[in-house]
Image: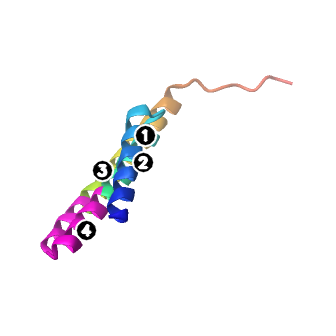
């Protein structure tokens, strides 16, 4: 029961970080941590019910969470590169 309570508390904190931000990277990391909390919850359910089928579901959730984090990281990197390319180059003053 303590494990379930701590996982649920962590999920609530992750949802708060998803909602409040402040930046996109914070929200991406919060969604990644939330996905791993879901994996932990599914594994805890599997142990409680003594059913190994849920381990496959936990593995699927972990893979989807990892893939989405990598995708968002690619998006953030591309967005930063395009923002850097749009900025004019600063010239050094002549001495």
Measure the C-alpha gap from mark 1 to mark 3: 17 Å
The chief SS type of the magenta part is helix
Q: Does the residue at mark 1 contact the one at mark 3 (Cβ under 8 Å)?
A: no
The part of the image, by quadrant, that contains residue 50 is: bottom left
Residue at numbered disc 3? 68
Residue at numbered disc 4? 43
Q: Please tell me whether residue 48 belongs to the stretch shown in magenta.
A: yes
First in sequence: mark 1 vs mark 2:
1
First in sequence: mark 4 vs mark 3:
4
First in sequence: mark 1 vs mark 4:
1
Measure the C-alpha gap from mark 4 to mark 3: 21 Å
Residue at numbered disc 2? 29
Establish if 4 lies above or below 72. below
Q: Does the residue at mark 1 contact the one at mark 2 (Cβ under 8 Å)?
A: yes
Residue drawn where x is 14% and y is 75% of the image: 51
Magenta stretch, residue numbers = 38-61
Query: Looking at the figure, which quarter contains the N terminus?
Result: bottom left
């Amino acid at each position: 029961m303590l494990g379930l309570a701590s996982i649920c508390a962590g999920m609530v904190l992750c949802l708060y970080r998803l909602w409040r931000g402040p930046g996109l990277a914070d929200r991406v990391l919060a969604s990644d941590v939330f996905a791993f909390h879901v994996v932990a919850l599914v594994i805890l359910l599997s142990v409680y019910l003594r059913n190994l089928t849920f381990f496959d579901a936990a593995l699927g959730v972990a893979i989807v969470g990892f893939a989405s984090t990598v995708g968002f990281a690619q998006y953030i990197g591309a967005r930063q590169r395009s923002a850097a390319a749009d900025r004019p180059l600063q010239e050094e003053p002549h001495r």
